[in-house]
Amino acid sequence: MPELRAGSPDMHQRFTLLGMPFNQMGMEDAKREVMTLASGPFKYVTTPNIDHVVRANADRAVASVYLKARLCLCDSRLLALLVRLVGMGRLQVVTGSDLTRELFESGLLASMRVCVIGGSERTIEALKGRFHLSNLIHHNPPHGFISDATLVQKAVKSIIEARAEIIFLAVGSPQQELLAAHIERSGKATGVALCVGASLLFLSGEEKRAPNWIQLLCFEWLFRLMTNPKRLWRRYALGAPKIIRLLLEERFRRWRGVAS
């Protein structure tokens, strides 16, 4: 059930689902919070989808990263629909791709110091040109870097030295969330980091996002699967049955708690 965490630094209403504390807020509130955090010590924002929730449920180390995030925003309309169908309430959705697009299209980033971790030079040049970003710092760690302490520290150092206000972590999940936790533990970085996955590829035009009507019908996952089946089939084939089972188990636990 939705709950207000008294110990939460921002005091936003939270919807705790399978141990993950989703913030219940709309897009405008999320943007406002991100821009407020940009001028302070380092904080990070996560945008978990079904795959992330399933992974975090099986890995305590990954789960703890979401618990420590300043904002945890639901990235999946399908997850929100399933939550409603099993009778667990309404989970508000602010997708990472939409939040990222809103920030870029606002024009505010053009006058800010921005850092991107991940992505190709092609992606970075496309973003610079389209959104007039004259102060963008880029670091692209190699594949599998999160398992190498030296490479992780190199990435952390690049962010500390960038002194950026807005940081986009685009190295895939759970690498980007784990990196965010490493950065925060350093105690030396500034600004706010958004764990955004493929969001920058949509903005640069390298990948096509589902049309709005498909998103609203909760079929964006199917669109992505059809456009990239080789990479995504395993995620959806294994993740869908797991999330349904987890939600039903959670619903039963809550029912038993009320009944007793």
Image (cartoon, grey):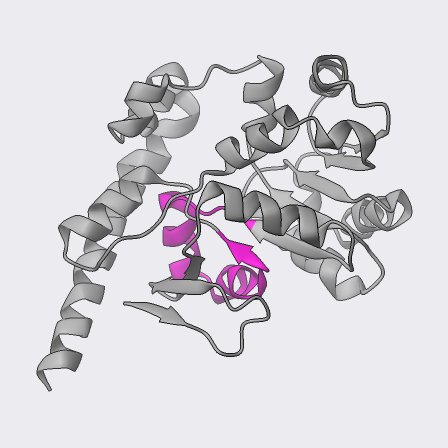
Q: Quadrant of the C terminus?
A: bottom left
User: Can residue 38 be seen in the rendering of this structure?
Assistant: yes
In the image, what residue occupies the spot 51% across and 32% down?
97
Residue 41, x across and y down, in percent = 78, 60
Q: Give the mark count.
A: 0
Magenta span has 52? yes
* Residue 131 in which image quadrant: top right
In the image, what residue occupies the spot 44% across and 19% down?
209
Is residue 228 rendered to the left or right of residue 160?
left
Is residue 83 rendered to the left or right of residue 180?
left
Magenta span has 114? no
* Residue 251 in which image quadrant: bottom left
Residue 186, x across and y down, in percent = 80, 63
Q: Quadrant of the N terminus?
A: bottom left
Q: Which residues are magenta?
A: 46-72
Residue 159, x across and y down, in percent = 82, 46
User: Can residue 58 be seen in the rendering of this structure?
Assistant: no
